[in-house]
Image: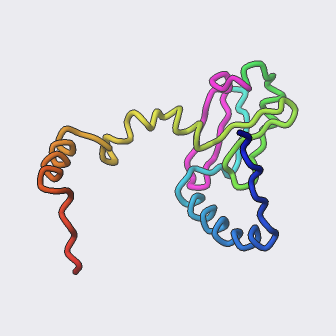
Amino acid sequence: MANPEPRRLTEAEILAQIPAAEARAREEALIEPRAASARYDAETGRILVELTNGCLFGFVPTERELLTTATPEQLAAVEVDLGGEGLHWEEIDADVSLPGLIAQRLNLAAWAPKFMGQRTSEAKSAAARANGAKGGRPKRDAA
C-alpha cells in the first residue's frame, strides 16, 4: 500500500510557526558553539575557528573527508555560514557542522558524562529496581 502524500501546510500555518522557531534558534545559539570567524592557518595547517564565546578551536582539515584533497588556497576560502553553525567552502562544495565537529573531536560522548552525570550507573539501576518493587517512583510533594 502506498503512503498517502503528506498534507501541505498553509501559508498561515507556516507563518504561525516562525516565532517558536526563532525562539528555539536563539536558545540554541546560547548553548551550542557558534563561529564568529574562521580562517586557514598555512603555518600550522589548521582551520582556526573563533567562537562567539571567545574560545579558539582548531582542526586539521584532513580529519574531514571532504577537505582531504583541498589545496591551501581552497582551504583559505572558508566561510562561516549564517548563524555560525557551520563552515562552508564554495569552490569544493564542502560543509562542516561546527557543533558536530567539536563534539566529535573532543570525544564528548565518552568523557562528558563523567562531569555532567552519567545516564546509567549501577546505583541508578539499583534505585530504579527498588522503586519498581515499591510500585514506582515516589510522588513529589506538591509544595
Q: Residue at position x 34%, y 48% from top?
A: 116
Name the spot of residue 21 as percent of width and height, x first. Answer: 66, 65
Q: Residue at position x 30%, y 47% from top?
A: 117
**114 or 140: nearer the eye?**
140
**30 or 119: nearer the eye?**
119
**87 or 38: nearer the eye?**
87
Give the quarter of the image for residue 92: top right
Q: Residue at position x 65%, y 38% from top?
A: 48
Asked whether residue 131 is drawn in magenta, I would say no
Give the quarter of the image for residue 23: bottom right
Name the spot of residue 122 as percent of width and height, x first. Answer: 19, 38
Q: How many marks?
A: 0
Q: Which residues are magenta?
A: 44-66
Q: Residue at position x 12%, y 49% from top?
A: 130
Asked whether residue 54 is drawn in magenta, I would say yes
**108 or 45: nearer the eye?**
108
Residue found farthest to the right: 91
Q: Is residue 6 above or below residue 122?
A: below
Q: Is residue 40 above or below residue 65?
A: below
In this rendering, position of residue 127 left or right of residue 97: left
Residue found farthest to the front: 1
* Quadrant, the N terminus: top right
